[in-house]
Amino acid sequence: MKLTAKLLTAAALLTASATAMAHSGHAEGGFTSGLLHPMLGLDHLLAMAAIGFWSVRQSKQMKNATPAFVIGGMILGATLAWGGLSLSGVETGITFSVLVAGILIATLAKLPTAVGGTLVGAFMLFHGFAHGAEMPAVATLATYVAGFSIATLAITFAGRGLGSLMLKVDSRFSRGVGGVLAVAGAYLAAA
């Protein structure tokens, strides 16, 4: 319980300024820019937290593998961007990830690990592509990847911590969180 509270507190402090979309670019150097990018974008923040939240109700295998699916998708997407490849519908994929994750939470959906892992990896592919495409020219690749990986995992684990707390209360609260996330995803898609 103490660890969960600490994780939630740390995530809340790190994301307190997350009021704008992350896709406006960052002037900071590698690590700081990588760290801030997922935390300053409401779409990234909601998607990663939602995936962590959703993972709590999955099989033990899926729950344990979720961080690897998240980071794997992020790095693959960023690598595509750095390789000069194009990925159509990036913003749509990002907002769709918030919408679908909200629906999965609201319906208390449990997916087989292969399906859930593929879905999480695909969602994070779009997020990673955006991160990779927006890496500042002055950033070094290793420090930028380290920054966005740490931030991504922190947000995902904060979502998981909140999801774990919600397991102890009526499932209607989790369904409500999912509903709010789905509406937020729909709003982001329409904006």
Image (spheres, rainbow, N blue to C red):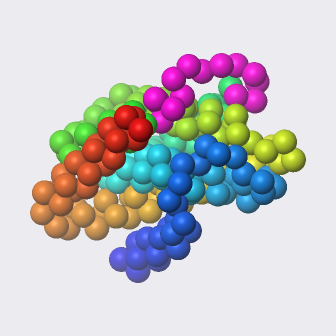
Question: Which region of the structure is painted magenta?
Answer: 81-94
Q: Position of residue 159 (x, y in %)?
A: 40, 58
Q: Position of residue 109 (x, y in %)?
A: 22, 39
The image quadrant that residue 81 belongs to is top right
Was residue 85 drawn as part of the magenta stretch in this picture?
Answer: yes
Residue drawn at the location 78% of the way across and 57% of the way down:
28
Q: Position of residue 154 (x, y in %)?
A: 54, 60
Q: Nearer the viewer, residue 93 or 172?
A: 93
The image quadrant that residue 151 belongs to is bottom right
113 lies above or below 84: below
| Left or right for 187, reference 74 | left
Q: Position of residue 121 (x, y in %)?
A: 49, 33
Residue drawn at the location 18% of the way across and 42% of the way down:
107
| Left or right for 70, reference 53 | right
Q: Nearer the viewer, residue 44 or 174?
A: 44
53 lies above or below 134: below
